[in-house]
Amino acid sequence: MENGDNIQRQTILSQLQASLRRGPLESPPPRTFEPTIVPARARGEALLLVRRFVQEAEGAAATISRVASIEDVPDEVARYLIAGNLPTVLRMAPDFRLARIPWARRPTLTITTGASDGSDEVGLTGALAGVAETGTLVFHSGAESPTTLNFLPATHIVVLNTDQIVGPYEQAIALLRAAGPLPRTINFITGPSRTADIEQQLELGAHGPRRLHIVLVDDPSIGSFGEHGVVNVSRYG
Amino acid sequence: MQNSSSEFEKNVSIALADKTLQKALSKFQDGFSVRRTQAIERLPEFDALRDRSKRIKEHTLKYLDYYLEQFERGVVASGGHVHWAVTPEDARQKILEICRGVGTTSVTKGKSMIAEEIALNPYLEKNGIEPIETDLGEYIIQLRDEPPSHIIAPAIHVLKEQVAATFRKAHSNFDPSRPLEKARALVDEAKEVLRAKFLAADVGITGANFLVAETGSAVIVTNEGNCDLTQTLPRVHIVLASLEKVVPTLEDATTLLRVLARSATGQEFSTYTTFATGPKRSSDMDGPDEFHVVLLDNGRSSILGGNFREILSCIRCGACMNHCPVYGAVGGHAYGGVYPGPLGAVLTPALDGIASASALPNASTLCGRCEEVCPMRIPLPKLLRHHREQEFSRQLGSTRSRLSLSIWAFFAKRPRLYGVVAAISTHLLYMAGGKRGHIKRLLFASSWTGGRDFPASQGRTFQSLWASGDSLISKAWPTSQRRQ
């Protein structure tokens, strides 16, 4: 820290303490533990939470397709892109679980892996978790999950397992805490990008994706997408 | 920005006469308040979350020095830097220094009220660095060279046709005959222009909705995703935040986030909530190489010890201005300062001193809607009254209003005399009203009656009706219910 910075730091801390009429604290502030208020809608059995996640995500203008196993993912991705008259060229996160999907079943899909430089029309990623409370997807930066894929392509397709769905935000945070120091970035994403800055009229696709499509796989046995070493944490506990 | 809150009265007259502004204002307030109500109806725990949020902030303010130092340790541990800035000038210099360190000529900016507060854009421009606002609303008003008129909807005062005209002028490399009637076309064009700027910038500056002490994270919320591109693509990410943004834990942040979007736009959750902790890790595929946090004081450390401490709990949702009849009538620019609405009427004089902004706390009927909707339960009317008391005790305010208050106080302290004088003046007002029942022009109040008629009294005072047991009174308050 430079000297000028240090003087300013001391000035501010001294004034704060003068306003608080005390000196620096000797020990951490006493705080009464109050359990987080978890809304009722974020609680319940796994099946109920999956239903709520779908309902809330759709309420936020995301679209969702449910498939029985990863074998069905390529067909669903191709169907979605063709139905929307979208390019079938995808930029995929270098996630080993996504790599396990039998993409060769749909040769029309052209897939490359890596971060996005802004030239990709469609991004394909996993996610750390889905939060049922508000239909929110949770992503984090890492070697297998570049952040640019969440924001630069106009269409973002996310492959998520039903057993990755948690109730409240705090359960997703618990997964991250268990994995050690926080990653550089954690993105809570609820529906596609939007703006109402022109006369309060809602338009999707402001700076981020215009379309957010979630392929929900009902097959917990295959392992979670986008988890990156975050394992053995009970999601419902 | 130029602070013109001392010219508030003149601004109000201009705003009320501005037909375009009045049309724009009539479109938005209802929308925000209806959506807020709907969102709250869907969350039975909302009031409990408000109470908890208030407690979190009160606790944090009580130990603000500790949590700021803890936050600093978290930033440093994750590879970032913290810069403390006592004054706006200190913050501007620090940001310029960082920009010069990487030799950049342009910076992309996410929406930041603190950047407005320290007038960052003109300073960067003066020093040869082009600031590019990336929030669509901010971008529009930057092109129009106007300050924001609302803290979450900065271009609320601009009509679609005006945006189209602004874009035609600014984006001269586009086909002049392109259609720009629809909001969609305007959004797409702005996206295209700004995407190139995002990819080219070396420095991105964002504000912060919260700073998390335990992890050293900066939390930023947007719907457009512009702050994410601002902080992901450039080599350097600078977070500019004021001291009171800190909260102790991640779970405190999620509690506050539950009330923030619902109070602001009536959304269940904003589209993008991002926790940024330090620069790019060695194994990361993208992200900035440098992560800086500039912590601005600008008088807040002193506000903490005084009458206006509660305003430091504000999470800048904008609900107070969305529900304020004064804001709804005059819009944000009339307030002159950076922060409009009830929040601004309390914060601007607290930051700048009551002498330069004394009209703001007076432009209120103290109707209390702001306090009712404030997610942090900040007693805004009480704080406005504190300002009025300060103004009076410092002998500010006009001679006439001080004189009138003194005359009223003289009588109010002498109840018998008050009754007699009130009875006489009530009778005079009744006579003056005549058959019309209202008075067109009132002596000593000509500026008030200049814009409206004064309703004439019905001839007798409330006290005399009460004493005589008038039928109106006995119907409204049966004798059995009266306290003798």
Image (cartoon, rainbow, N blue to C red):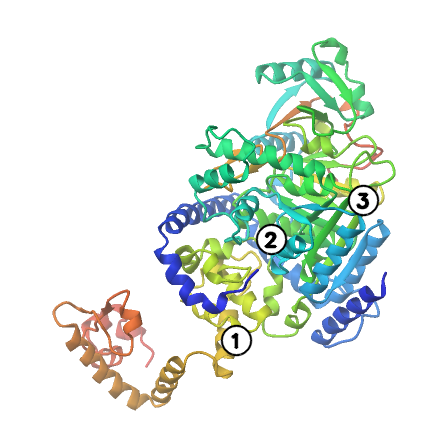
Residue B241 vs A20, above or below: the answer is: above
| Residue at screen point 83% across, 24% down | A96
- Residue, disc 2: B49
Which chain does the residue under circle 3 lie in?
A
The local crowd at label 3, few if under 14, some if 14 to 19, many if 20 or more residues have their Cα within 10 Å, is many
Residue A182: mark in rendering: 3
Q: Distance between the residues labelled 2 and 3?
A: 26 Å
Q: Mark 1 lies on which chain?
A: B
* For the residues bearing labels 2 and 3, Cβ distance under 8 angstroms: no
How many marks the image carries: the answer is 3
Residue type at mark 2 is Leu
Q: Mark 1 points at which residue?
A: B355
Q: Observer-nearest residue: B253 or B48?
A: B253
Residue B130 at x, y percent in the picture: 66, 48
What's under tag 3, amino acid-wise? Leu
The one nearer the camera, B3 or A27, is: B3
Q: Is residue A226 left or right of residue B310?
A: right
- Report the chain holding disc 2: B
